[in-house]
Image (cartoon, rainbow, N blue to C red):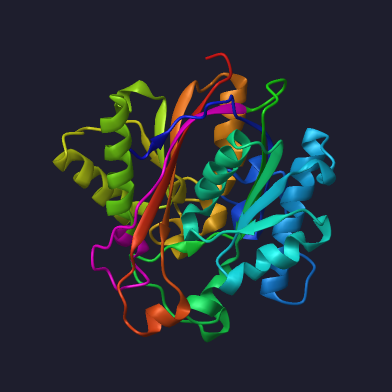
Amino acid sequence: MRVIKPTKPTYILCSASVGGNRERRGQIGSLFDITYTDDRFGKKTWEEAEAEIQRLSLSKALEKGGIEPKRLSCMFAGDLLNQCVASVFGLLEYEVPLFGIFGACSTSAEGLILATLALNGGAELCSVTASSHNCSAERQFRFPIEYGSQKTPTAQWTVTGGASFIVGKRKENALAEIKAVCTGRMMDSGITDANNMGAAMAPAAADTYISYFRETGEGPEDFDYIFTGDLGAEGSDLFKLLMAENGYKDIINHLDCGLMIYDPNDEDIKCGGSGCGCSASILSSLILPDIKRGRLNNVLFAATGALMNAASVQQGNTIPGICHLLRISRIGG
């Protein structure tokens, strides 16, 4: 069984998002808590800039919730850099126990699942932070932006941004309740092209959704929306095809975070957005506020990740995908 239902009520108390310049000009640009026109965020390097995204988002989330950092039982945080150094240096000042996690673009959902389990095991408050940066990711996985390499049609644009969430047991003024989670398993469809991550992740997204629906007896029609993040255009089409092959045809309430964050007329974006900061930003800036306002009652939020590193890509290895899912509901809904 992959679906886990919390034994104790578990709530997302507050959240905050941070975006860069291109994200500021995208479809949800006005919804970010913090945006910068300078993607260096006042720092000397791209990697330091990504660490600053982590610091800014957690600081803002704590501020919005009126929560002192010392009240956190632990922090879950991840990014795309080797050994999650953006999380390390971005959150170093907080002096709170840290679990560094790597789920690639699925990091936000992975962190929220782990925070839910920690709370049900006795923790009082947990934070979850996820970030990515276009320039640091390009330098690590492909080519530095100064190289001027051309993107393929199936490529996605790594989001410069991130978000933090505070998860706890307090119901008052919370944004939403985590009703259930479904843990992802690794799926390898043989994709070796790092510029086609949507195709690498789509089988994992379908596998997790199918497992959730079959275990719970629920279906896509039982939710306002079912979200994936971030399959992009290529991966979203493949996801729907795989779902149809398994009996879930004509899904009309599917939205992909990679297709929601940028201006669709921006030619540099190609197939959409990606990166740890993509689905995290959509969840914090758009989905959770809409749940709090009552515009949404029940959603499934599933973040997908392409499990690779710089060495595996250079060595021509396949790119396994993974997808973690949460059932998030309006409180009292």
Let me know if residue 39 appears in the view.
Answer: no
Residue at (49%, 20%) from the top-left corner? 297
| Quadrant of res 314 | bottom left
Q: Residue furthest front?
A: 121
Looking at the image, residue 209 sits to the left or right of residue 301; the answer is: left
Give the vertical position of 299 relative to 319 (above or below).
above
| Quadrant of res 45 | bottom right
Coordinates of residue 311 in the picture (x, y in percent): 44, 82
Coordinates of residue 32 in the picture (x, y in percent): 67, 44
Coordinates of residue 93 in the picture (x, y in percent): 83, 60
Give the vertical position of 62 relative to 329 (above or below).
below
Residue at (74%, 62%) from the top-left corner? 90
Residue at (54%, 21%) from the top-left corner? 295
Front residue of this view, candidates 8 and 140: 8
Q: Which residues are magenta?
A: 176-200
Let me know if residue 312 appears in the view.
Answer: yes
Image quadrant holding the N terminus, namely top left
Q: Per the image, is 254 magenta?
A: no
Residue at (81%, 41%) from the top-left corner? 71
